[in-house]
Amino acid sequence: MLNPFKHSPVGVVMFISGAAGFLLGCFEHGTWQLAVESAQVVAGLVNYSRDNPFYMHHVKLWSLLHQVCVPLLLLGISERILSFIFSGFIAMFYFQALSLCVWALCRNIPLAFACPFFVAFTHSTRFCAIYPVVLMGTSNTHGAIGLSLVLLALALMASDKYKHAMFLLGVLPSIHLALGMLC
């Protein structure tokens, strides 16, 4: 019988919390994603005039997220399906980051699994007076994924997983330039 707890606790926390977050993000908090909108323009599926500010925004603001979507759109995957998949990834990274932060602090796996559910269902990130932090159910793909990956990279460092953290830090500027450079 396969015992997942004989493997790295970091891997167990990442896998289970990531799977739960992905499913919750796709099916409970799925929404349209801005990265998919830009990918439609880059793929040539939506046409703007060349001097339109929206066109310039979509084609000049490069992101790895757009580049991942373009071939999928060209293969015929709908923007709705891609948006729901991105909603799942947003929640997956959010759940992984929060779970791993808790695990790095207390090394308690059940508490690490419970934390993102507690934060999500109490909406505790939405009561910020200066800037609301919306980590699921948002269409701001770049900001939500970027913020979650910054927190995940820091949690990986706190968990002594430096190679994975450095990889994320290297990829972050291609997802959200400002957050990636600041981190």
Image (spheres, helix red, strand yellow):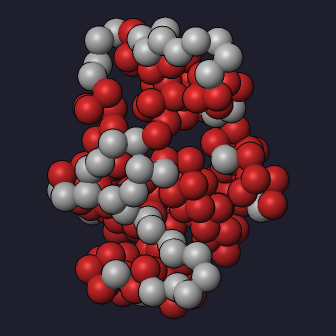
Location of residue 82 (image quadrant): top left
Residue 162 shown left or right of residue 85 in the figure: right
Quarter of the picture containing the N terminus is bottom left
> How many numbered marks are there?
0
Location of residue 32 (image quadrant): top left
Tell me where residue 40 appears, x and y as whole percent.
45, 20
Residue 21 shown left or right of residue 168 in the figure: left
Towards the viewer: 75 or 97:
75
Towards the viewer: 60 or 161:
60
Q: Residue at x 43, y 15 (%)?
A: 46
146 lies above or below 5: above
130 lies above or below 36: below
Q: Is residue 18 visible?
A: no
Q: Residue at x 29, y 48 (%)?
A: 31
Tell me where residue 168 appears, x and y as whole percent.
66, 50
159 lies above or below 36: below
Towards the viewer: 173 or 52:
52
Tell me where residue 54 appears, x and y as whole percent.
58, 29
Q: Residue at x 76, y 53 (%)?
A: 178
Q: Residue at x 45, y 30 (%)?
A: 37
Quarter of the picture containing the C terminus is bottom right
Towards the viewer: 39 or 49:
49
Q: Is residue 24 visible?
A: yes
